[in-house]
Structures are given as structure tokens and as C-alpha cells.
Amino acid sequence: MRLGLAILIGAAFTAIVAFCADAVAGDILHVFPYLDLALAFPYGICGGLIAARIARDQEISAGFGVALLTVFVGLISYRMNGAPQAVWFWLAITASLAGGAVFGSHLRAMSVARAKALEKRSPKIRKARRAAS
């Protein structure tokens, strides 16, 4: 249940950020369509990171879920709208969003693993590490 909710929230956040950015930079994107492609990866990272934060102990699964949902929604959107760009552009932007979502969840999983590793250290090592920082 929590994983499904995390996937939906992560994908929704990615879509909202992308739509808002497209609305703000609408005229610029008509002149520079590749700007949208360049920004897709960071949008995906944000969505994957949020999904991974919500889905505790299932961070990577949340990222893959956001990626799959992004691909599915993108495919439906492409079929319904018949986007004016070439197919390669749709593939590239979808791959960038999906890759970003998986990378964002990976970042969260590494952060959680690092925190758990620091907790397992003995008090002397933690104290010495804090003194060194």
C-alpha cells in the first residue's frame, strides 16, 4: 500500500513540476525544444527521491515504479496527442525521466544505507568521527 502510494506521489510530483516548467517556459521551449529534454532528468530525480522517501525500505522499488508509470503515461500521452516531435525525441525524454527517477531513488537508498552504517559503529568510532569533522 505504502509503495503504491509512493509511486503515485512521485510520478505526480514529476508531472506537476514538468507541466509547471513547460507553462512558465512555453515560448522558450518552442525555440529551444531540447531544453525540455535537458530538464527531464532532474525532474525524474526529484520524483524518484520523493517516492523513495515515502517508501521506507523499498527505495529502489519505488524508483522503478515511478519510472514504469512515467513510461506508461508518456506512451498514452504520445498515442493520444501524436506529439509534433519525432519518435526519437519522445524516447529520449521518457528515458531521461525514467532514468532520473531510478537515480533519485538510488540516491535516497545510499543515504539510508550510509546512515545505518554509521549507527552500527561503536561509540568510540562515532565520537572520533564527530571530533574530526
Image: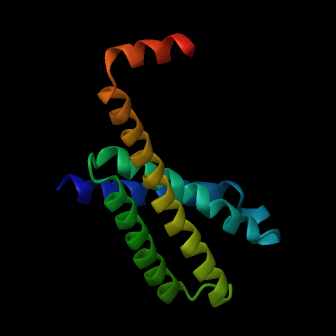
Image-based side of 103 in relation to 54, left or right? right
Coloration of the structure image: rainbow
Where, by quadrant of the figure, is residue 96 drawn? bottom right
Instruction: Pick the quarter of the image with the C terminus.
Output: top right
Image-based side of 62 in relation to 32, left or right? left
Where, by quadrant of the figure, is residue 32 drawn? bottom right
Q: Nearer the viewer, residue 100 or 11?
A: 100
Q: Nearer the viewer, residue 20 or 116?
A: 116
Q: Nearer the viewer, residue 125 or 4?
A: 125
Instruction: Pick the quarter of the image with the N terminus.
Output: bottom left
Q: Residue at x 33, y 15 (%)?
A: 123
**Relative image position of residue 41 (x, y in whole percent):** 60, 61
Q: Residue at x 34, y 26 (%)?
A: 121
Q: Residue at x 39, y 60 (%)?
A: 63
Q: Residue at x 60, y 55 (%)?
A: 42
**Relative image position of residue 16 (x, y in whole percent):** 49, 56
* Residue 80 higher or lower than 120, as above or below: below
Q: Nearer the viewer, residue 44 or 116?
A: 116
Image-based side of 13 in relation to 5, left or right? right
**Relative image position of residue 27 (x, y in whole percent):** 77, 64
**Relative image position of residue 30 (x, y in whole percent):** 77, 71
